[in-house]
Image (cartoon, rainbow, N blue to C red):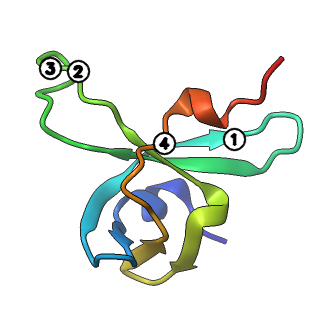
Amino acid sequence: MVRISEFQIKDVVNISDGKKLGNIADIEINLDTGKIEAIVIGTGGKLLGFFGKEEDVVVPWNNIVKIGTDVILVRFKDQKYSQQQLQEPK
């Protein structure tokens, strides 16, 4: 088992180019199934969320390749995922 606090301190790295995407700021959980749907990576650049509105990067759970002791490897294409893309149509 992994606690959320342990999950948040790991660096998230894109395996396609080796770039560090950031750290996990939040997770999306499907309340019906209890499963994690996506991780939300804070992009930084905002001062306490007040100045500027940068979109967070949302990586679907199935794009996580490996969770290691210090790093989370993800398969992330140049396309940015938004939280709305992950929600199913009603």
As drawn, which residue projects farthest toward the right?
32
Query: Contact (CB < 8 A) between labels 3 and 2?
Result: yes
Q: Earlier in the sequence, mark 1 or mark 3?
A: 1
Q: CA distance from mark 3 to mark 2?
A: 4 Å
Discs 2/4, front:
4
* Label 2 sits on residue: 53
The kind of residue tagged 2 is: Lys
Look at 79% across and 23% down and name the residue there: 89
Residue 69: x and y in percent read: 43, 83
* Label 1 sits on residue: 29
Q: Is residue 85 above or below residue 18?
A: above
* Label 4 sits on residue: 81
Of residue 15 and residue 27, the one placed in the foreground of this image is 15
Q: Is residue 51 above or below residue 36?
A: above
Of residue 38 and residue 26, the one placed in the foreground of this image is 38
Q: Is residue 61 above or below residue 50?
A: below
Q: Earlier in the sequence, mark 1 or mark 4?
A: 1
